[in-house]
Structure formats: C-alpha cells, structure tokens
Image (spheres, grey):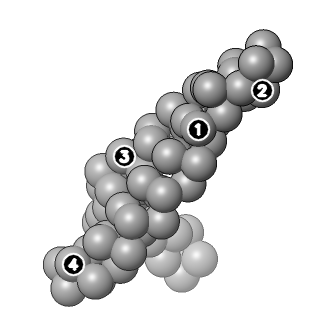
C-alpha cells in the first residue's frame, strides 16, 4: 500500500490541486453565484483529497481486520 500511495498519491495531489485552482479561479467572476460555486467546489476538492489520503486507508484496514473475518464466520455457518 505504501508504494501505491507514493505513485498514485502524487498524481492524485496534482490533479486535485489543478482542479481546485480551476474552481477557485471562479472567485474572480462578477457573477455572485459563480463566485460562491467556485469557492465551494474548490474547498470540496481539497477536502476530498484529504479524506481519500487519510480516511480511506483506515477504512480499508478496518475492513480487512474486522469486517471480512466476521463475514467469513457468518458465511461459514
């Protein structure tokens, strides 16, 4: 999983950063709805990156250590 994060994590960071910058560029618009949308979506993209890099590995680990063994017990009966 470490090697996957080294390779995919950097690419995910670059794509999230460029997408967030594009959305944040809408803040310069004179239309209020576009400004709000741009700031909201830019923030969502950054938070999504942070969640994918922190919470997703934890969820996968919990699934492997606790959920799958329980499922195996249930389906083995």
At mark 1, the secondary structure is: helix
Measuring 52% from the left and 46% from the top, which residue is drawn there? 20
At mark 2, the secondary structure is: helix
Say above or below: 48 vs 77.
above
* Marking on residue 34: 2
Mark 2 touching mark 4, by CB under 8 A? Answer: no
For the C terminus, the quadrant is bottom right
Q: Quadrant of residue 35?
A: top right
Measuring 54% from the left and 81% from the top, which residue is drawn there? 76
Q: Nearer the viewer, mark 4 or mark 1?
A: 1
Where is mark 3, residue-wise? Answer: 50
Where is mark 1, residue-wise? Answer: 25
Left or right: 47 as drawn, with respect to 9: right
Where is mark 4, residue-wise? Answer: 6
Tell me the CA gap for discs 2 and 3.
24 Å
x and y, in percent, of residue 74 in the image: 55, 69
| Label 3 neighbour load within 10 Å: few <14, some 14-19, many 20+ | some
């Amino acid at each position: 999983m470490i090697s996957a994060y080294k390779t995919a994590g950097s690419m995910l960071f670059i794509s999230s950063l460029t997408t967030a910058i594009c959305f944040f560029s809408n803040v310069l618009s004179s239309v209020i709805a576009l400004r709000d949308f741009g700031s909201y979506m830019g923030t969502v993209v950054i938070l999504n990156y942070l969640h994918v890099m922190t919470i997703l590995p934890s969820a996968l680990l919990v699934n492997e250590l606790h959920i799958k063994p329980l499922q195996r017990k249930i389906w083995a009966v």
